[in-house]
Image (cartoon, rainbow, N blue to C red):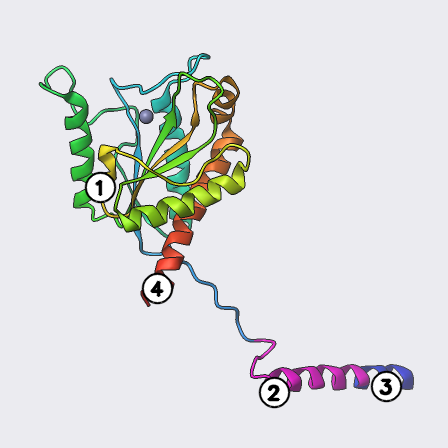
């Protein structure tokens, strides 16, 4: 009994000494950790490329780009909402924003204009257009992230997303690069993510795999989160 009492006393002295040392250094062992949630309250536009009459590119196993774009976009939406962001989608089903039969002239441009107006009216602070790539070179593989030339915010966002995609696929994903895409006019921090090549037979299978789609969507969200976290530090 006496021995147990001595042990408890030794333990208490130890704990007290530890606490006092911590107080001396000005850091309490019991102080709550500061966790930041950079996406809370942010309005983010997600644009699943193509849709409706416009299927986009196609893989040799018959995978149609517009469907994979939408599947990954919906995963990105759910992930961003989980992290506190408000998400505005340019489409949430297999549809185009124009009626191709009654639209005259360059349909593609008019359809994209509708998307830009929709996202612009929602005052999105960042916009991510999701696509799958195609090449005549069947060995071309890996994600690419594009931003508009001269657009600093777009470049920063593209670099953060590309970094996370490279961490996910160190062998094939590439760094951010300049792209000339109409959707990059949605807001300053606009990027277009080509998640991989549907024309690569191996990657076509991967891009339709639910697990891989989830991993890609998490990597994209990690990049968006990092972009806003960095911006908070620079503009307190
Ligand atoms: Zn596309």
Q: Which residues are magenta?
A: 10-30
Q: Position of residue 124 (x, y in %)?
A: 24, 47
Quadrant housing residue 108? top left
Which residue is denoted by mark 4 in the rendering?
A: 234
Q: Nearer the viewer, mark 3 or mark 2?
A: 2
**For residue 197, above or below residue 152:** above
What is the CA distance from the residue labelled 1 to the residue labelled 2?
52 Å
Q: Position of residue 203 (x, y in %)?
A: 50, 23
- CB of mark 4 within 8 Å of CB of mark 2? no
Q: Earlier in the sequence, mark 1 or mark 3?
A: 3
Which residue is denoted by mark 3 in the rendering?
A: 6
Which part of the image, by quadrant, shows the C terminus?
bottom left
- Say which element carries label 4: helix
Q: Earlier in the sequence, mark 4 or mark 3?
A: 3
Classed neighbour count for the residue bearing mark 3: other residues with Cα under 10 Å, few (<14), some (14–19), many (≥20):
few
Name the disc covering residue 186, or none. 1
- CB of mark 4 within 8 Å of CB of mark 3? no
Q: Position of residue 172 (x, y in %)?
A: 51, 32
Q: Nearer the viewer, mark 1 or mark 3?
A: 1
Which residue is denoted by mark 2 in the rendering?
A: 24
Instruction: Please report the residue visible at 81 percent of the width from the left and 84 percent of the height from the top.
Output: 10
- Say which element carries label 2: helix
- CB of mark 1 within 8 Å of CB of mark 4? no
Whether the magenta-drawn stretch holds residue 23 is answered as yes
What is the CA distance from the residue labelled 3 to the residue labelled 2?
27 Å
Classed neighbour count for the residue bearing mark 4: other residues with Cα under 10 Å, few (<14), some (14–19), many (≥20):
few
Q: Dividing the image into four equal quarters, which quarter contains ligand 1?
A: top left
């Amino acid at each position: 009994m006496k021995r147990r009492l001595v042990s408890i006393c030794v333990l208490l002295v130890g704990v007290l000494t530890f606490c006092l040392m911590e107080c001396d250094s000005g850091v309490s062992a019991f102080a709550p950790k500061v966790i930041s949630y950079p996406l809370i309250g942010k309005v983010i536009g997600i644009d699943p490329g193509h849709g409706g009459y416009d299927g986009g590119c196609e893989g040799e196993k018959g995978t149609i780009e517009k469907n994979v774009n939408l599947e990954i976009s919906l995963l990105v939406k759910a992930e961003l909402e989980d992290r506190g962001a408000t998400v505005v989608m340019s489409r949430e089903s297999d549809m185009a924003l124009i009626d191709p039969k009654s639209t005259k002239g360059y349909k593609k441009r008019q359809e994209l204009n509708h998307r830009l107006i929709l996202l612009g009216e929602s005052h999105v602070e960042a916009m991510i257009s999701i696509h799958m790539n195609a090449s005549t070179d069947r060995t071309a593989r890996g994600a690419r992230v594009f931003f508009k030339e001269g657009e600093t915010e777009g470049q920063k966002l593209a670099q953060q997303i590309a970094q996370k995609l490279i961490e996910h696929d160190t062998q094939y994903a590439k760094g951010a690069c300049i792209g000339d895409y109409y959707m990059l006019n949605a807001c300053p921090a606009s990027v277009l993510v080509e998640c991989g090549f549907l024309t690569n037979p191996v990657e076509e299978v991967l891009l339709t795999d639910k697990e891989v789609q989830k991993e890609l969507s998490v990597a994209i969200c990690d990049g968006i989160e990092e972009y806003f976290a960095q911006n908070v530090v620079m503009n307190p």
